[in-house]
Image (cartoon, rainbow, N blue to C red):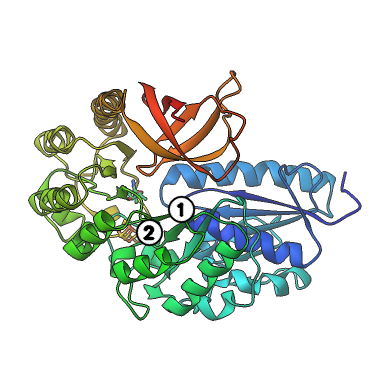
């Protein structure tokens, strides 16, 4: 049954870029009189904001679309829209193969959404639209009132041979730094304490200053207590960034630096433009400037032609570097990418075995690192009641991005920086106590 008021539900798959895009989509819909709902039930419009980085994400989208299409048979007034990377990739073909879809638009056409709402069966897949100009006109709906995402650049020029992103999000383009600073100032003015700068490759930012200069400018904004950023590409990471993180207390002690593989021959075929040895040198540079820095990474298991000895090099790299955490994935063949056409695609069985080994090795390392923090004190930004904890605990994050659960006291409220002593380290979180 549809509700009286216009209600929209937005389902988001994929990376932080997509999460941020959904905030823009929600903002536009709210401006058009929609309530944003947490469930698809009873919604008059469902937007499926899709991801195509791996086949699994695409399958999840297709099964949700199938479910909604059945619902639409019973309630023909339900509108279904598809956005994100699959929409961009499939273009008009998606409307043909799935007639239940009313309209669809790519990541670079979100700001055209207003028109599509009143003009069904439209699609828009412009390439390289300059979003920054449009963004000034928008008031995104933000999901969190303490920590905000801020786009600093869009697209990617790297063409890693496995990756679909350059084909779905277009060429790299940086927002002018003045726009970013003004957005950050506005956020500070309405109470935001933490900003995460978003880009596919933030180290190649060139919107009028260098990325470290941008970080420094944002750190000068009163009210902003913490600054984070994702994602960094190892080839563009330099001493200027490492020393800026080390010297500036507001810039968090965490970097996500995808290595993808510990084998230099695989890295060459991935078109990553660095060897494992060069990557390791960057890790040493970071640790020299920021001794306490937490480093997380992405790994792909079973890239085409990856030999057993390449895989062993990846496992060795995990042990050598000791990442605080990893995201590991089985290689997935993606349309249009160079790697999809490479010889020696590996079986799912080999990919699964290698992925399992990578995760087992890395879990032990993560847990050991978290155990080693027991007894130490860290600044934690308080975020709210812990969702996983039954004992009325609160949670927050260290600057190294580790979740800490602790018992609150009478002064505890959201958005404070408090000192917490770590009592016990686990694989995914830490338990601590307030130090008063
Ligand atoms: N198969 C598996 N993992 C992939 N990634 C990107 N493309 C693929 C693919 N085709 C992973 C990379 C990247 C992360 C966001 O997703 O590790 O860093
Ligand atoms: Fe994809 Fe490589 Fe660009 Fe990351 S840097 S989005 S993995 S092409």
Indicate the position of residue 419 as horizontal and vertical percent values: 42, 35
Indicate the position of residue 67 as horizontal and vertical percent values: 68, 41
Image quadrant assignment for residue 231: bottom left
For the N terminus, the image quarter is top right
Vertical comparison of 175 with 165: above or below: below
**Residue at the image position 50 percent from the left and 47 percent from the top:** 58
Tell me if residue 157 can be seen.
Answer: no
Number of residues whose C-alpha sits closer than 10 Å to that of mark 2, classed few (under 14), some (14–19) or many (20 or more) = many
Number of residues whose C-alpha sits closer than 10 Å to that of mark 1, classed few (under 14), some (14–19) or many (20 or more) = many
Vertical comparison of 332 with 172: above or below: above
**Residue at the image position 26 percent from the left and 57 percent from the top:** 247
In the image, farthest residue toward the front: 436
Left or right: where 283 falls relative to 377: left
State the SS at label 1.
loop
Vertical comparison of 320 with 54: above or below: above
- The residue indicated by pointer 1 is 52
Tell me if residue 424 can be seen.
Answer: yes
CB of mark 2 near ligand 1 (< 8 Å): yes
Q: Could you say which disc has been placed on residue 164 in the image?
A: 2
Q: Using the image as rendered, state which of residue 430 and residue 138 is in the foreground.
A: 430
């Amino acid at each position: 049954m549809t509700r009286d008021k216009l209600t929209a539900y937005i389902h988001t798959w994929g990376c932080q870029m997509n999460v941020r895009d959904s905030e823009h989509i929600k903002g536009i819909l709210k401006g058009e009189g929609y309530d944003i709902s947490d469930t698809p039930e009873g919604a008059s419009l469902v937007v499926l904001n899709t991801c195509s980085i791996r086949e699994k994400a695409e399958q999840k989208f297709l099964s949700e679309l199938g479910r909604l299409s059945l619902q639409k048979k019973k309630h023909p007034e339900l509108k279904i829209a598809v956005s994100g990377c699959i929409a961009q990739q499939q273009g008009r073909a998606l409307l043909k193969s799935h007639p239940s879809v009313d309209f669809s638009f790519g990541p670079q056409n979100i700001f055209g959404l207003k028109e599509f709402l009143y003009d069904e069966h439209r699609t828009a897949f412009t390439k390289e639209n300059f979003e920054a100009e449009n963004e000034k006109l928008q008031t995104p709906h933000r999901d969190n009132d303490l920590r905000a995402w801020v786009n600093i650049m869009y697209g990617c020029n790297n063409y890693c041979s496995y990756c679909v992103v350059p084909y779905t999000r277009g060429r790299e383009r940086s927002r002018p730094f003045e726009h970013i600073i003004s957005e950050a100032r506005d956020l500070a003015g309405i109470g935001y304490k933490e900003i995460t700068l978003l880009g596919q490759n933030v180290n190649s930012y060139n919107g009028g200053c260098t990325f470290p200069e941008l970080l420094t400018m944002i750190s000068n904004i009163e009210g902003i207590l913490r600054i984070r950023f994702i994602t960094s590409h190892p080839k563009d990471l330099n001493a200027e960034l490492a020393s800026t993180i080390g010297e500036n207390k507001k810039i968090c002690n965490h970097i996500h630096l995808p290595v993808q593989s510990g084998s230099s021959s695989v890295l060459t075929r991935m078109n990553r433009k660095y060897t494992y040895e060069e990557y390791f040198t960057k890790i040493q540079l970071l640790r020299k400037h920021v001794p306490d820095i937490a480093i997380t990474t992405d790994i792909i298991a079973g890239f085409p032609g990856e030999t057993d000895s390449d895989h062993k090099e990846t496992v060795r790299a995990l042990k050598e570097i000791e990442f605080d955490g990893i995201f590991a994935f089985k290689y997935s063949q993606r349309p249009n990418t160079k790697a999809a056409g490479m010889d020696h695609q590996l079986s799912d069985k080999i990919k699964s075995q290698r992925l399992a080994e990578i995760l087992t090795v890395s879990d032990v390392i993560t847990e050991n690192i978290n155990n080693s923090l027991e007894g130490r004190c860290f600044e934690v930004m308080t975020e709210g009641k812990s969702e996983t904890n039954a004992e009325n605990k609160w949670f927050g994050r260290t600057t190294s991005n580790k979740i800490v659960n602790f018992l609150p006291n009478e002064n505890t409220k959201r958005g404070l920086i408090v000192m917490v002593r770590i009592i016990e380290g686990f694989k995914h979180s830490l338990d601590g106590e307030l130090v008063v």
